[in-house]
Image: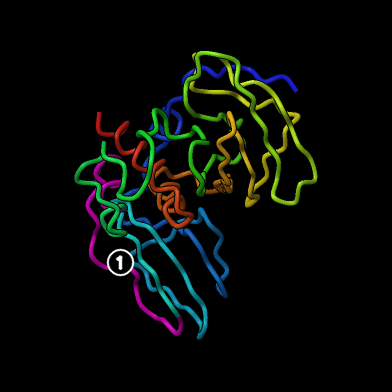
Amino acid sequence: MRFAPALALTAALLLAAPLVSANELVVLDAKGVDLAPGAKVDGTAKLTLAAGARLTLVAADGRTIKLKGPYDDSPAPGQAEQANMGDALKNLMSQRGSGTAQLGVVRAGSEGADLPEPWVLDVARSGPRCLPANAAPVLWGPRFGEATELKIEPADRSWRAKGSWPIDQDRLALPPSIPISDGTTYQVDVGGNPAAIVVFRIPAALADPVAQAAWMLEKGCEDQVRALARVASR
């Protein structure tokens, strides 16, 4: 199996996407209501939810709103501030106690350095990873001064891919022949250091960047959102 070194990635596409207007809310998750992730609703208009229905929304300033039916009111009657991308991401993470006051600091208990790019997949430790719907996977890990074996396989061991980590490189682009599916756990072993990562694909309909970041936080991809916030704050 041949792998190729990867060029540096950026958050340009996500950060260039237009933010929702101050009164708009973006649907992150919906149950029992005819709304899909990515849909936009007017925060000042009345919204009706039947008993048992649930709805998670995110505002332009990063506020997350969770509603449970029965509900019959406007979800955000007060106009939200039109925050910039960096501030909205900080607001999102502060709601979750993710410690965005120091965006350059890895959260307590984790190992390794900050991500150099939002969309690289850290293979040095286990945990969730998030990727845009159609993005090609790029692994990120230690630099080695000599040829180092790389092994990848899904949790069900239905296949296994082997190759070499590129010498003196910290990134490796996976070829299209290696399927990286949404919600699947993969065992990645670089130089005898195994890590279990589960990859979540951001729904394509979820185009708003703040909503994407909120969705990522729900999946546990805090380090990647922190990397997005660093890029947006530059």
Compared to residue 183, the image places residue 104 above or below, namely above
Looking at this view, name the residue that lies furthest to the left: 101
The answer to which of 213 and 100 lies nearer the viewer is: 100
Q: Is residue 127 depicted above or below 34 in this figure?
A: above
Q: Mark 1 points at which residue?
A: 76
Expressed as whole percent of the image width and height from the top left, the position of residue 73 reads 35, 77
Q: Which residue is drawn at 39% across and 28% down?
A: 116
Residue found 56% across the figure and 60% down from its top: 36
Specify whether residue 36 is painted magenta: no
Q: 10 Å neighbourhood of mark 1: few (<14), some, or many (≥20)?
A: some
Residue in front for this viewpoint, 88 or 161? 161
Instruction: Describe residue 191's horizontal placement relative to residue 153 as left or right.
Output: left
* Residue under the point 42% across and 29% down: 117
- Magenta range: 69-92
**Residue in view at x 25 percent, y 28 percent:** 234
Q: Is 108 left, or right, of 207 in this rendering? A: left
Q: Judging from the image, what secondary structure is the residue with disc 1 in?
A: loop
User: Which of the two residues, 171 or 14, is positioned nearer the viewer here?
Assistant: 171
